[in-house]
Image (cartoon, helix red, strand yellow):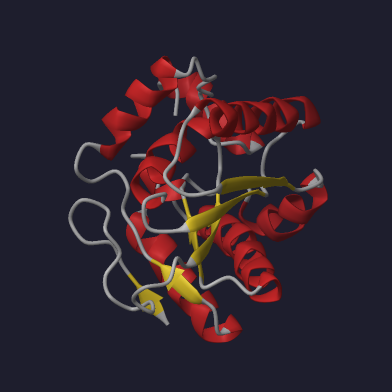
Amino acid sequence: MAFGLQTGCEPDAMLQPGEMPRLLLHCCCAPCGGYALECLSPFFEITVLFYNPNINTHEEYNKRAEELKKLTVLAEYPNSVDTVISDYDSAEFETIAMPFWDDAEGGRRCRACFELRLGQAARCAGKGGYDAFATTLSVSPHKNSSMLNEVGSILAEVTGVKYLSSDFKKNNGYLRSIELSKKYDLYRQRYCGCAPSVKRAHAVGVDGR
């Protein structure tokens, strides 16, 4: 139930020709969304889902949500792009992440977080009758695309909704995301979202993501 992106961000031939398919795109933040939307908008009508209960404060959540809405207003896309902002509930993340709270970034806590956020996207895509779901998370060089795509593929089998696998950091995707952030004057956060990632960012001086 998973299909992928060819070189140049063109989806491979798994959807019906002659139709404009609908994609539910989980988005972690505006900077990552900029490049993914640029890639995908020629091929899909897109609803961007901002569902990120891993973000450590309500203030930060609202700031990232507003930046995402700003992007979709300023940028011009070949097909329609709508935005859905989920209510903030950090307890959803803390419940699934607490057993792995002290794990290194990229380990079990991150996988549980991927399962939470992509799981919500898959369920929303199913309820909304979308042709597929995807995520922008693979833009970041700090995110394991293989793990993301494994989680997405499993959720596709469980929900029956096709998953668009990706590694948006390829073909200089991360650099393009930085260019688009500068073009639209987007806030680029210095950490993924959760409290442990804040500590790591302060410790190693991570650049904006």
On screen, residue 31 versus residue 87, left or right, reads left
In this rendered view, identify the residue nearer to me: 198 or 168: 168
Residue 186 image offset from top left, x and y in percent: 52, 20
Residue 188 image offset from top left, x and y in percent: 50, 22
In this rendered view, identify the residue nearer to me: 122 or 140: 122
On screen, residue 116 versus residue 89, left or right, reads left
The reply to whether residue 102 is in sight is no
Position of the C terminus by quadrant: top left
Image point (45%, 65%), residue name? 20
Residue 112 image offset from top left, x and y in percent: 59, 61
Position of the N terminus by quadrant: bottom left
Image point (41%, 70%), residue name? 150
Instruction: Count all numbered tags in the image, as a single digit.
Output: 0
22 to 70, vertically: above or below: below
On screen, residue 32 versus residue 26, left or right, reads left
On screen, residue 102 versus residue 140, left or right, reads right
Q: Quadrant of residue 15?
A: bottom left
In this rendered view, identify the residue nearer to me: 129 or 154: 129
28 to 190, vertically: above or below: below
Q: Quadrant of residue 187?
A: top right
Residue 106 image offset from top left, x and y in percent: 44, 50
The reply to whether residue 83 is in sight is yes
190 to 18, vertically: above or below: above
Outermost residue to the front: 18
Image point (40%, 17%), residue name? 183
